[in-house]
Amino acid sequence: MKNFVKWYGIIAVIVFSFASCSGGGGGNVDKPDNNSGGGLVGTIVSGATVEYDQAFFINTVDMNAAKGYTNFSFFWEDSSDSLDPLRDYINEPASVTVSGGTVTIKLGTPKFDLNSSNSWLIEDGISISPNSAKVYIDTKSGNFGTADGKYGLFCIKDMNNFAVLCYADMDVTIKGTSQYGEKYDCTFKKGWNYIIWSVNTNTFTSSVSQPNGYKWKVINSSLM
């Protein structure tokens, strides 16, 4: 589970505030495998499959208990944190519902000011087009959980490839390699999108829809 910890620790501070950046370029957009989509505000995911893998639960009893939860409309950060309702940070609609083995995610615009003090200028070496664009990426965009904090809902391919929902205030391209060796090749549409981190290559790509091969999985929070 260490990659989960690393991933969410990194992505928690990636709030791009673009000012005095130039350039641009094409992005790498993965093909969707269902009818969930980014570049939207409202119903972001509809009918995407939710999986329950035994490896992410203490035992079968625990996994079966998780299947009884339907409301994941709370922010998940780690098993020790208190959970806040999604609507406290996202304008309505703001709900994540699991039912019949599928998930529906409805999100409005973030309530956070994209120019707030928790944003930071992107490192040199990254080109952004247009340079006035702002992309809000935070753990609270992609870590959904139950009210009691027992279970989280994540979009993953495997333990080395993760996807988190992010919000862009306009269509924007982010491309280049940061001073820390992080490689970006992203194209976001205005609205909600996915940013994808490949751990082995330290590469960030994007998708306007749920990336091919990525699944929403329910995981016991104590195992994170």
Image (cartoon, grey):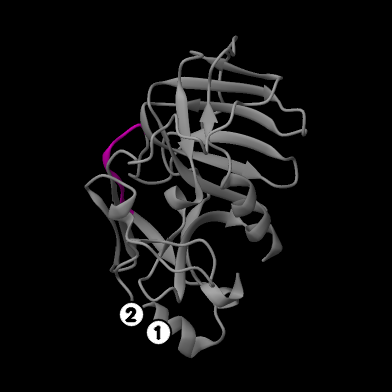
Q: Which quadrant of the structure image shows residue 43?
A: top left
Between residue 141 and residue 64, name the one nearer to us: 141
Residue range (magenta): 39-47
Magenta stretch: includes residue 42: yes
Residue 71 horizontal/vertical position (percent): 30, 68
**Label 2 near label 1: C-beta < 8 Å?**
yes
Which quadrant is home to the C terminus? bottom right
Residue holding disc 2: 68
- Residue 107: in sight, yes or no? yes
Q: Residue at x 35, y 71 (%)?
A: 147
How would you classify the magenta stretch by its main secondary structure? strand
Q: 10 Å neighbourhood of mark 2: few (<14), some, or many (≥20)?
A: few
Outermost residue, bottom side: 61
Residue holding disc 1: 65
Between residue 39 and residue 36, name the one nearer to us: 39
Q: Is residue 28 rendered to the left or right of residue 49?
A: right
Q: Which quadrant of the structure image shows residue 223?
A: bottom right
Distance from label 1 to label 2 (Cα)?
5 Å
- Residue 159: in sight, yes or no? no
Q: Residue at x 45, y 52 (%)?
A: 140
Outermost residue, front side: 117
Q: Label 1 amino acid?
A: Ala
